[in-house]
Image (cartoon, rainbow, N blue to C red):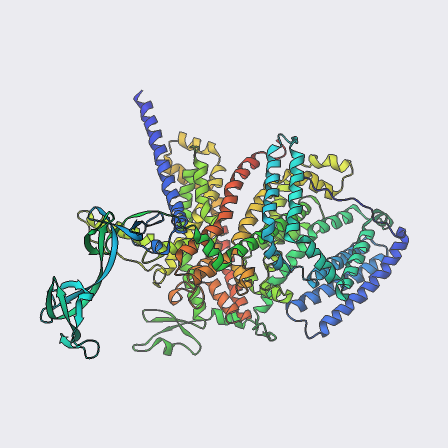
Amino acid sequence: MASIRLPSFKLPRLLDAPRWLTLLTVWRLVHALAAAAALVLVLTSETIAGPARIAGLSASILLLLLDLGGFLGLLRRRSLGRSLSLAADYLTFMGAVIALLQANGVFVGMDALGATFGRGVPYFAVALLAWLLGGAVVKEGRDSPLTRPLRIIGWLAIGAGLLAVGLLPGLATFLARTARPLPLGLLAVALLSAYLAWRTFQGDMALELRISATSQRTMDGLLFVSPNLLGFIAFFAGPLLFSLVVSLTEWDAFGAPTFVGLGNYANILSLNVQFLDAGQSASAALPAGYFTWFTVGSMVVGARDVMFWTSIRNIFVFTLFALPLSTIPALLLATLLNSKAPGIKVFRAIYFIPSIAGVVAVALIWRQLFSATSGWLNYLISRFVVFWNGLPLVPQMTDPRLQWLSDADIALFSLVIVFSWMFIGYNAVLFLAGLQGIDQTLHEAAMLDGANRWQRFRNVTLPGLRPTTFFVIASTGILTLQLFGENVVLFPTTTPIGAGPENSTLTPVVYLYDQGFRRFSFGYASAVAWVLFILIFAFTLVQFRRQRERVEG
Amino acid sequence: MPAVTGSKRRAVLNRAGLYLGLSAFGLLMLFPFAVVAFGSLKTVSDVNRYPPRLLPATQDVVEVDGEELELYRIEGQERVLVERVDIGIFAPPDDLEATVQAPTRDAERRGGFLDTETVEVDGEEYELYDVTIGGELVEGLVQLGSTTAGIFALPEDRDDTVTANVRTAQTVDSLSFQTSNFREVTDLQGLDRSLTNTLLVTILVVGGTVLTSILGGYAFARIQFPGRDAIFLVYIGSIMVPFVILIIPLYQLMVALGWINSLAALVFPFIFNAYGTFLMRQFFVSIPKDLEEAAVIDGASRWTILWRIFVPLSMPAIATLATFMFLYAWNSFIWPFIVIGGGNLDNHVLTVSLQQLGGRAANFPHLIMAGVMIAIAVPVTVFVLAQRYFVENVATSGIK
């Protein structure tokens, strides 16, 4: 393993600690003014809207608060002042660097890299090979004479690969683009903030302000977490809150959103039950705005958003079949795998393969098998029917010749087959890990008590597997409730895409996609997402409580 | 004594049953892959053939007098198809059951094309033909249907001919692998570019996730600071949040950044991963403190300790995370479908390309299967390699 060594160089420490403290205090005011100016700019701007506005507002307010707090703290020579000041300069630095990269088109420039990347692949493959060999020749932690040459070959291959991919033209473009006012300004801000943060971080400043160990540790900790945390806020926490807000609006993404409160949710969830009089039609019995979801006898259930409720019905049926089909055989398989017979690892690997092939490939594989005219499934069924009809004393069967993907009664079950096939092996490996964690002495004790195989499975294995079972059911359930990829691949031409024949495979995520990206009702689609989230959460919670009750009971 | 042999026999039976069960499941898992692997090497007519067969084969051809002719097996003899003849099924209008077959070229339409003579039978109108059957002219027949007959000759003797139905004739086939399918599908859907794009995105996602997870996991595991546990709890909670809820807002964020239809949208939102941070943190916590204490006494910085002590010890966890993220990035579909599915082909990744191929090349199932093989080749290879790497490495962690 090649260790990563950073080049060491020393930046000069400008000014001594007391003077730097004075300068920093003044700088905080300047920085606060800049943050305030940015805040005013965002507030008054007409062009900054949507997520950019939210991000701009929260960033400038955060910086302003950090600056003011830092200023007061530094003035009173509190260690908190240094912490806040560091945070403000560090965030400014990160923001300026990202803005510089964005302004120079580095992120979007990845597309051009995609075009040339193929040329570098052979070199990178050589580097990978050298690295793997380097790991293989190390014996008991000691380097072999081959380690050094392999390391050199690896680094040379990476260098050659980068050159082949176009590192130099890329750098030239970057430098040329930096020579414009905005990027230059951003570069200056980034360098300045970096130096300010670094200088303030030095030991003499810590001594000057009598920084406590806790405060220092906090700074260290936040520094290490910061790349992760900032990304987490930008790409998870922020969007999550944004989604909640959007779900309370009517928004087509072009105009300004209109606040509608819980209106979207009311529309989605509204149901109405009526009992029909003789001869009355369902649509006449339902109040205005409601459409028939289903009828049972004389009872008619209407919904304002029938499509949504259809998707709920479909996903309920799908989960009802797919969940047992992808977990119970998996448990059986795991008990088979849990033996010391030779070759068992090969079988384990084989069962795992469907789950690594990915949804799209798996769905396309099954599309071939489902083919009504030349697919293996119908062929094998025909063969079975011929075999069956040849048996004496059985009722004759007719060859069903199923239309797996175009018959509205079957399409959803075809998806069940695809999904279960994909996850049986994966779940079996999870169960296997659980089985291997069960204390063997319990089995032996049960055997001494004369328990047969089934009793041992029922009374030792199953209780011991409970945490695994919970995990498998919960994670599989979360997947089934979000079914989308299989639909889109198997039904690419229906409208909505993935909804299948007569909406028979319309699932909540398919519906969400249709609302969001075909009808551009982003507010409504966000509300659908939240309803689905609550559904998934409730499912997980129920599983969790069932597991806990059993353990305690 | 008999008891011992009995239990021995039972053990053997058990073992046999075990392998039988395992193999049955194995067949269930492998057979669909085999169908597609062989299907990717077939011609389109071979794929669409019924009953289906596993191995790719094409009909043999024999050169006879400088002509390439298709080979069939007729009544146990190998014969070549010399000529196809359209056969009409004719019957007299007063008895439609009494059919005769004759080549349509021997049938002449009464009255030519201009004023064809017709006759009405059971409410349907039929054209009248004069047909030469066995050298004799039979007049006034109606045509009920048609079929194709072939004249089959022995390859060594072209005059020895037999007439038989071409459609039901048994063909003489031999294995042949259409490797050109891969080239064809690559050109059709730009799969080479999708492959390098997918590679690039995957490498960046794996590398980025491992880097941020190591940094974050280390802080959560080893640096005690106020608020740390609260942040960590939020991280764990976020693992529970399904991705679908982020689709709409993330899409808006990508619009704001100008990353729609760009590979950047597939990389940066995914390299800050709560699951990875959690995984690394759990592993770092299990590393004994005395390993780093010597380094702390030597005055090493946290940065040095992390990269010199923690990272080398955590290779199994890093490999687990890298494999997980590799599969995630390589196979992710819903997000690429939304964010780059509408853009130009050049920026597509494999999953999106395959989905589109499936939509537009429905009549070329052999090409779709070739595309599937291209897409799964890399993950399957990595899995086969990393599977061993895992098993060996989990056993040998830093401290024994």
Q: Quadrant of residue B3?
A: top left
Quadrant of image for the N terminus of chain A: top right
Task: Name which residue lies at 55% across and 58% down.
Answer: B243
Q: Nearer the viewer, residue B12 or B238?
A: B12
Task: Name which residue lies at 71% across and 74% down.
Answer: A45
Establish if A131 lies above or below A50.
Answer: above
Q: Left of B350 or right of it: where is A144?
A: right
Q: Nearer the viewer, residue A116 or B68?
A: B68
Q: Quadrant of residue A491?
A: bottom left
Residue A484 seen from this side: no
Task: Name which residue lies at 20% across and 66% down.
Answer: B105
Establish if A258 lies above or below A218.
Answer: below
Establish if A368 lies above or below B141.
Answer: above
Q: Left of B72 or right of it: where is A480?
A: right
Determine the residue located farthest toward the front in the rendered image.
B65
Q: Which of B368 and A28 is in front in this view?
A: B368
